[in-house]
């Protein structure tokens, strides 16, 4: 019986090819940050209030001014067809079924238009790896907007691919039939990590955001913010939001856990733009701790992938629903009737 995200991960490991599982599960270097992302949640304890009327507890919240069913979105994760033949389409449809947003990765096997057509009614964001081919990037963004996506998530912590040694030990390469239509060129090379690093322009600076804002009519969130200084620069350059993230521990090993960085970013920004966070979320109670520390919502990447590997669209839906149930139960025990009532008063350092 699969009762939690950990159960789905173990079943996914049993079902998946070792190379594919390692690609999704692994991190950079010694995987210190990968582990710390999860462990950071144990460094905070709840402070529940009792004798509060929690006869009716609801989980919806708003992100960028629009309501979603819970303070949890599906994070962009590459190459989802490695987990299941239906890939991103299955994930998007499951997100729609539970009423939340799915963020499509640039490294998907379908275009934004194809995903929107295959999963009508899904609330979609698009994660951008900014290519050195600016014309290609402009055309890609135009397609994103035309397909009805609601926002663009610009990943800013990827000037080069992190050294992910699980992949190197496994000599991981992409299957020949896995297409990547949202990047110029191909990633199907023996030196996968070198090819991966070539999908981005490492010369980008804050000044380039002006071009992005002109080329893209949608709200832009910057993903990969790990300091108050960069959070302020994001707001000053017109970002609609920031996502506190260390790329799931897959880039620079040894940086702080996302949750540990969240309070610094929230304090720096105040109410200027919305703050989201990803990394290490495995329980609904993790979501509530992130809310208490100032996040508007969290994004989860690996948990939906484990559901996808286990049961396709149904598996993703099951994982998202169990997380929503854990959020609702946690709210009830905390004495909060909605995510909006969760504040810093609900947690304390361990």
Image (tube, grey):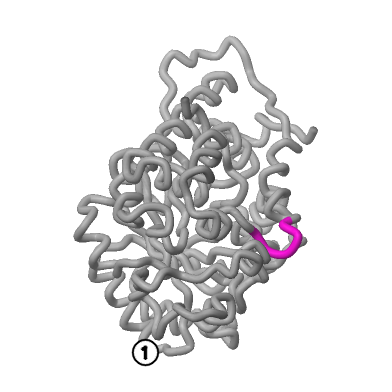
Name of the residue lying farthest toward the top: 51
* Of 28 and 123, the residue lying toward us: 28
Instruction: Residue 42 in the image: state x and y as whole percent.
Output: 72, 36
Q: Does residue 6 appear left or right of residue 60 in this picture?
A: right
| Viewer can see residue 275 | no
Q: Residue at x 40, y 46 (%)?
A: 308
* Of 117 and 1, the residue lying toward us: 1
Q: Residue at x 68, y 53 (%)?
A: 34
Q: Does residue 150 appear left or right of residue 319 in this picture?
A: left
Instruction: Residue 249 in the image: state x and y as whole percent.
Output: 65, 58
Q: Residue at x 57, y 52 (%)?
A: 278
Q: Does residue 188 appear left or right of residue 205 in this picture?
A: left
| Count of number-bearing discs | 1
Q: Is residue 30 above or below residue 67?
A: below
Q: Quadrant of the C terminus?
A: top right
* Of 166 and 62, the residue lying toward us: 166
* Of 132 and 187, the residue lying toward us: 187
Q: Give the structural element (helix, strand or loop) at label 1.
A: helix
Question: Dot 1 surroundings within 10 Å: few (below 14), some, or many (20 or more)?
Answer: few
Q: For mark 1, what is the residue?
A: 135
**Residue 328 among those drawn in magenta:** no
Q: Main secondary structure of the magenta part?
A: loop
Magenta stretch in the rendered image: 27-31
Q: Residue at x 33, y 78 (%)?
A: 140
């Amino acid at each position: 019986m699969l009762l939690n995200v950990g159960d789905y991960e173990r079943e996914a490991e049993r079902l998946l090819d070792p190379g594919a599982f390692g690609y999704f599960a692994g991190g950079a270097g010694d995987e210190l940050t990968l582990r710390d992302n999860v462990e950071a949640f144990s460094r905070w304890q709840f402070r529940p209030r009792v004798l509060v009327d929690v006869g009716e507890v609801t989980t919806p919240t708003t992100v960028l001014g629009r309501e979603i069913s819970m303070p949890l979105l599906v994070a962009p994760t590459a190459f989802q067809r490695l987990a299941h033949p239906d890939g991103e389409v299955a994930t998007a449809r499951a997100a729609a079924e539970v009423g939340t947003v799915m963020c499509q990765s640039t490294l998907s096997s379908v275009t934004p238009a194809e995903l929107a057509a295959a999963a009508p009614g899904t609330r979609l964001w698009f994660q951008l790896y900014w290519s050195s081919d600016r014309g290609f990037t402009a055309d890609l963004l135009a397609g994103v907007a035309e397909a009805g996506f609601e926002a663009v998530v610009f990943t800013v912590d990827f000037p080069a691919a992190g050294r992910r040694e699980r992949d190197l030990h496994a000599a991981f390469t992409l299957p020949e039939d896995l297409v990547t239509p949202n990047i110029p060129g191909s990633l199907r090379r023996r030196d996968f990590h070198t090819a991966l690093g070539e999908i981005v322009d490492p010369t980008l600076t804050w000044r380039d955001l002006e071009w992005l804002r002109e080329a893209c009519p949608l709200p832009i969130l910057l993903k990969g913010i790990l300091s108050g200084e960069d959070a302020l620069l994001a707001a000053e350059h017109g970002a609609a939001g920031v996502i506190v993230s260390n790329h799931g521990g897959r880039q620079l090993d040894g940086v702080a856990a996302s949750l540990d960085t969240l309070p610094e970013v929230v304090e720096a920004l105040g109410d200027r733009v919305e703050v989201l966070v990803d990394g290490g979320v495995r329980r609904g109670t993790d979501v509530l701790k992130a809310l208490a520390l100032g996040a508007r919502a969290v994004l989860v990447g690996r948990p939906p992938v484990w559901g996808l590997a286990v049961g396709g669209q149904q598996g993703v839906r099951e994982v998202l629903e169990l997380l929503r149930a854990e959020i609702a139960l946690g709210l009830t025990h905390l004495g909060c009737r909605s995510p909006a009532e969760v504040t810093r008063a609900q947690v304390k350092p361990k």
